[in-house]
Image (tube, rainbow, N blue to C red):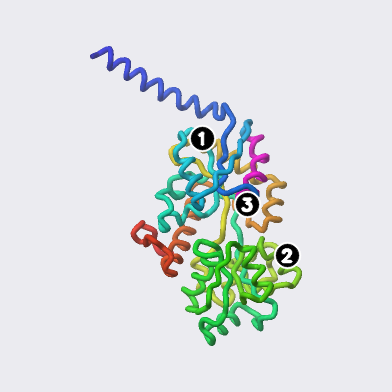
């Protein structure tokens, strides 16, 4: 019996001694980066633009693979199932933060450590150029006078247009008819053709149309000026109540499992911070219509928590949540 206890104690000591050495030597092999969405999408483009800038600071390659499906649930489950050794990273977007209220998964970013929130997209409310509105306030007043008559382009529950529409309804009680499309591209095409009257959309989907004068930009969904969009009024100009929901928009980042040793997390955070700071990647974000963030750890967790609260409660108000955020302990924004 004494011999067995001696062997067990020695084994435990060996494990304890091994882990710090492993962290100190990390990484000793190439890493795997799991991209939440398919090839050619926004998350894929961000991941592939970032990775070459990070690899020199790790001294190893990050082998990227695409694992789309389940609105991000397939990739999050895969990374969560891997060992907590820092060799499997999740390159994701905002979608897991609504998985629990939509019953898509029991996982969200509470189960992962934010190595880096790279940047966030910006929403813009655009209207068909033939509409009489000169401001977002004009649109709201017209909607109040003609409830249900104005048509809003949307991408269905979960998309940027849907969430911004829910925010607007919670503040202004406006009544419009939502017309769903399979993506921002088809929605914007319908807007250009006059099949819908206005649409909240990501700046990347409408930037060139704004520049060419093919659509009217009524408001940017932000409470502080966005570089390159200074001529578009902030949504808080006429409706300061929006401030409690902002900043809000789609975002991109890199995560590992929460249980990864802290020394390894520090190495990853440092490498990705340096990589994301590179001029080439920052230029990519600007061209991509993304506001740089480059945050990690507790600061990133605060951002994620607020984003989740705003979005999940907007779904609840709009009747799209399958599980109330209150039951999941998600506080109202």
Compared to 136, does 73 lie above or below? Answer: above
Q: Mark on residue 86?
A: 1
Tell which circle, 2 or 1, labels the residue nearer the N-terminal end. Answer: 1
Decide whether residue 46 is among the magenta residues: yes
Compared to 64, does 311 lie above or below? Answer: below
Q: Is residue 125 left or right of residue 173?
A: right
Q: Which residue is mark 3?
A: 41
* Quadrant of the frame with the C terminus: bottom left
Q: CA distance from mark 2 to mark 1?
A: 40 Å
* Quadrant of the frame with the N terminus: top left
Look at the numbered disc 1 and give the secondary structure of its residue. Answer: loop
- Crowd around label 2: few <14 · some 14–19 · many ≥20 (10 Å): few
Q: Mark on residue 12?
A: none
Look at the numbered disc 2 and give the secondary structure of its residue. Answer: helix
At 64% across and 81% down in the image, what residue appears?
Answer: 133
Q: CA distance from mark 1 to mark 3?
A: 25 Å
Q: Mark on residue 208?
A: 2
Decide whether residue 238 is among the magenta residues: no
Q: Where residue 181 sits in the image (x, y, percent)?
A: 58, 66
């Amino acid at each position: 019996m004494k011999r067995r206890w001696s062997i067990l104690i020695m084994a435990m000591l060996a494990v304890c001694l091994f882990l710090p050495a492993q962290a100190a030597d990390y990484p000793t092999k190439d890493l795997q980066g799991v991209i939440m969405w398919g090839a050619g999408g926004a998350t894929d483009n961000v991941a592939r633009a970032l990775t070459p800038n990070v690899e020199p600071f790790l001294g190893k390659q990050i082998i990227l693979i695409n694992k789309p499906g389940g609105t991000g649930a397939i990739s999050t489950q895969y990374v969560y199932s891997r060992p907590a050794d820092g060799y499997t990273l999740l390159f994701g977007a905002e979608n897991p933060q609504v998985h629990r209220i939509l019953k898509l998964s029991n996982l969200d970013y509470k189960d992962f450590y934010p190595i880096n929130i790279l940047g966030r997209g910006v929403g813009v409310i655009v209207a068909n150029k033939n509409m009489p509105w000169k401001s977002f306030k004009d649109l709201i007043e017209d909607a109040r006078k003609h409830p249900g008559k104005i048509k809003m382009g949307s991408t269905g529950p979960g998309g940027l247009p849907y969430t911004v529409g829910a925010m607007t309804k919670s503040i202004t009680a406006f009544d419009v008819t939502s017309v769903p499309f399979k993506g921002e591209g088809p929605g914007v095409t319908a807007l250009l053709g006059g099949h819908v009257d206005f649409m909240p959309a990501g700046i990347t989907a409408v930037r060139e149309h704004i520049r060419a004068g093919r659509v009217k930009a009524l408001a940017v969904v932000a409470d502080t000026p966005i570089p390159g969009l200074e001529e578009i009024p902030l949504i808080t100009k006429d409706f300061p109540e929006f401030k409690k929901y902002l900043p809000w928009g789609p975002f991109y980042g890199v995560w590992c499992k929460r249980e990864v040793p802290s020394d390894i997390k520090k190495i990853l955070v440092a490498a990705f911070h340096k990589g994301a700071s590179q001029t080439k990647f920052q230029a990519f974000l600007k061209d991509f219509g993304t506001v740089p963030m480059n945050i990690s750890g507790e600061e990133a967790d605060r951002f994620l928590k607020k984003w989740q609260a705003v979005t999940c409660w907007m779904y609840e108000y709009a009747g799209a949540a399958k599980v109330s955020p209150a039951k999941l302990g998600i506080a109202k924004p």
